[in-house]
Amino acid sequence: MVLCGLSQKYLEKRLEIGKDAKGVMLEVKTLKTTNYNEAILYDGELSINDKIAVANLEGEPIITGIRVLEEIEPLSTKFKPKDKVHASTGLRMQLKEKADILPGMPFEIFKNNIEDIKTRFKKEISESIKTEKQGIIVKADSLGSLEALLVLLNQSRIPVVKAGIGTISKTDLISAKANLEINELDAMILGFNVEMDEEIRDIKGKIKIITNNVVYKLIETANKFREEKAKEIEKRRLMELATICKLELLSQYVFRNTNPAIFGVKIIAGKLKAGLNLIDENDEKMGRVKNIQSEQKSVEKAEEEMEVAISLSGANYERQLKGKKFLYTDISESQFKTFKKNKDLLSQKEIQALQEIAVIKKDWEK
């Protein structure tokens, strides 16, 4: 019998055996098209004529009769049919109710005490699965695995807003996408020992989905992603305040001399956006970027290594730009100091461009 993912608390149940049957579902197995639930009975006795209540993930009871009751034989993986079994023992049951039974869920004998059972189940599940108002989505193969994963995520200070058992589904993806507008760090789904539905593989977009069968590898990868994403978000915030950009003039592509000057450039470092003011290597103001075109289409920005055409208002190419090699964005000294303080967020090319701008602005502290 497979015991993987069994919650520690079920292994620490009291040694004093009661009368009412209580146990935990371990896994569902299919034998010749028939589903069997393997379980552990840790308290009381259970008869084939009894009804049992099994918790779902929300703590609601699933009521079902038992069609087949089998007990595991000592020192064996084989099961033997029984009319009655006593704790503590391993079971295999074929249930009459066809509802999905999740691994790791508690069960107990049903004696028409639905409200009492519901209260106990909800308390037990809520104690096992504690989530936050905001965080990532987590899926695992069993309740025990999910509990362990939540503990480790809490230790890593990764908040969880939704936790469940089973395959990563489209519903999970929709929940994660809602985080994109709130906190990009939480636009992530972690799956321990689970698969993802085929339908979401091609539509996950910006959602990071990480799966692994080794829990510590899963946490490690999640931490690394969040660290990199945090740097990316901080850099984007920084670049919204000001932009570092170094341009190489492509003198063979001059489309208009003035009003505005239109010519080709290559982005050597940083990003180029419309509205930026440019200076040359002598700190002379060259004008403001009015428009950027790539492949004859206007674009909002251009990234490193791209070759684009720009229109520069207030510039005369023949008089001001001819013969020049590079242009830079015109940033203030306070912006320079902010960039310098956050150098870890910049690429090597951006750092180099920043140093060159500092040389151009001769009176700045390098």
Image (cartoon, rainbow, N blue to C red):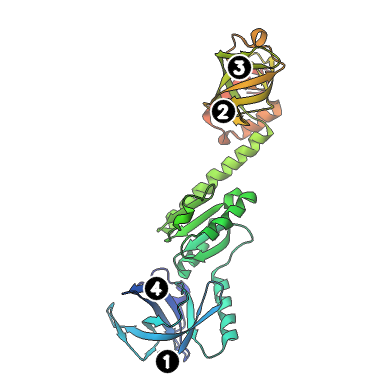
**In front here: 360 or 33?**
33
Kindly identify which residue carries mark 1: 49
Whichever of labels 1 and 2 marks the residue nearer the N terminus, that label is: 1
Do the numbered discs 2 and 3 sit on residues whose CB atoms are within 8 Å? Answer: no
Q: How crowded is mark 4: few (under 14 residues within 10 Å), some or many (20 or more)?
A: some
Please, what is the three-letter code of the amino acid marked with disc 4?
Answer: Val
Please, what is the three-letter code of the amino acid marked with disc 3?
Answer: Phe
Mark pair 1, 3: CA separation: 86 Å
- Nearest-to-viewer mark from 2 and 4: 4
Kindly identify which residue carries mark 4: 28
Kindly identify which residue carries mark 2: 350
User: Hey, which quadrant is residue 282 in on the image?
Assistant: top right
Please, what is the three-letter code of the amino acid marked with disc 2?
Answer: Glu
**In front here: 5 or 47?**
47
Q: How crowded is mark 3: few (under 14 residues within 10 Å), some or many (20 or more)?
A: many
Taking the spot 47% from the left edge, 63% from the top edge, the residue there is 140
Tell me: residue 353, above or below residue 154: above
